[in-house]
Amino acid sequence: MKISTFRKAAVGIAAVLMMTASAGAALAQQKITIMPGAWSGNTIDFLRQQIKPWEEKNNTKVEILNVPNNGTEILAIMQQNLAAENSDIDINAMDVVWQGMLERYAVDMKQFFTPEEIAKYTPATISLNTIKDRLIAVPFYGDVGLFYYRTDLLKKYGYNEPPKTWAEVKDMSDKVQAGERAAGNANFWGFVYPGSVYEGFATDLVEWISSYGGGTWVDKDGNVTANNPHSKAALEELTSWVGKTVPPGVTSYIIDDARGAFQSGNYLFMRNWPYAYAAMQADGSAVKDKFAVTAIPHGPDGKSASGLGGWQLWISKFSKNQKLAADLIKFINSPENQKDRMLKLARLPGYPELLNDADILKTYPWVEMVKNFDLVARPSGSTGTKYSQVSNAALKAVNDMMTGRAKVPERLEQLDKELNRIKGRGW
């Protein structure tokens, strides 16, 4: 998808608006356009249904654009539109690591949200979205890394609890994989995750490395730390599983590919976001009532670390409908709509008080466990506008390791040099 696609759409929209205006300005319908994020599952269709009452009340048509389910590609499209000062798009999605790259294009939400409205959100997310005292975005939903496991298969093979370490993941995977294949399922594998060269995999990587005590490529002070013994140990272990415990095709999987693979019934373990829980509990799912979630495993010198994810909503400074767009965001994030998205889609709400809601806790008992997770963030805060370059370099390096194009020690050393080159005189 290229910027020209949006240009053509804008021309068509303008024509429709001109015809409407000619029929009488009093009848003219307003329009708000949203560029969504990589919202896996049926989040976009669900959101379209949620906002219908707002559309009717405000005589406004809301268009949610079709975009790839790939954050890296979405960011490229978004940056093209913003560079062209495109006023056709009013509301954009923002990954939890894009603030430094996009803040100069965003309006200050404080002009539309009262202090009381802002205070309803998790303080940490408000802090994350505040740059130079400007609130550039508010949360749409939160994400934390979850480790999914087949309860029926662990019980079948004599395990009473899920793995706590990566070594246990490997041992359990080998035993169950061998048993299921011997029983006739040649397509059974131990573990699946989204291993493609895209931003969705970056969170898995920081979980892996951090869970071994290896940090996150760049520390909070801006020092490049990619090449260290703990990082090396994590990557040598986990990349060695490809083709043995993990299918070779995982190097091209994005998040929903991993969910679909696990949901087929041919995997013992999966790393994914909360949305997968709701999707896999749907009627017709091959694994309905046969799985549960736990904390991300850890290495011998580390502790469990759950990757921080989620998407924000922000308003483009080029939008001609900023006040109306802000009103729509408030409606989208009403307590009722956030609760409904959590119950139906397992999209973690931006209001922390909803995590204590009785209906939510009954539907997803694991929410209590999530409250106590140790979270790890990708190093976007310390790398600022250069984060995308840092992430791409790390993703390509690990892909080289996973596909056998490079050995871990040499490629890690090369990555360390690449990151220092990107850093230059500073972030």
Image: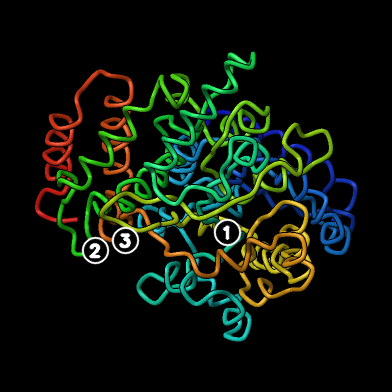
> What residue sits 53% from the left and 25% below the top?
177
Q: What is the crowding at mark 2: few (fewer than 14 residues within 10 Å), some, or many (at least 20)?
A: few
Q: Quadrant of the N terminus?
A: top right
**Helix, strand or loop for disc 2:** loop
Q: Which residue is mark 1?
A: 313
Q: Residue 157 placed where, x, y %?
A: 59, 35
Q: Is residue 416 above or below residue 68?
A: below
Q: What is the crowding at mark 1: few (fewer than 14 residues within 10 Å), some, or many (at least 20)?
A: many
Closest to the camera, between mark 1 and mark 2, is: 2
Q: What is the crowding at mark 3: few (fewer than 14 residues within 10 Å), some, or many (at least 20)?
A: many
**Helix, strand or loop for disc 3:** helix
Callout 1 amino acid = Leu
Q: CA distance from mark 1 to mark 3?
A: 18 Å
Q: Which residue is mark 3?
A: 381
Q: Quadrant of the C terminus?
A: bottom left
Given residues 303 and 334, the one toward you in this image is 303
Q: CA distance from mark 1 to mark 2?
A: 25 Å
Q: Which residue is mark 2?
A: 220
Side of 193 where 304 appears, left or right: left
Callout 2 amino acid = Lys
Q: Residue furthest bottom?
A: 116
Closest to the camera, between mark 3 and mark 2, is: 2
Callout 3 amino acid = Gly
Q: Residue 297 placed where, x, y %?
A: 42, 50
Q: CA distance from mark 3 to mark 2?
A: 8 Å
Q: Is residue 211 above or below residue 134?
A: above
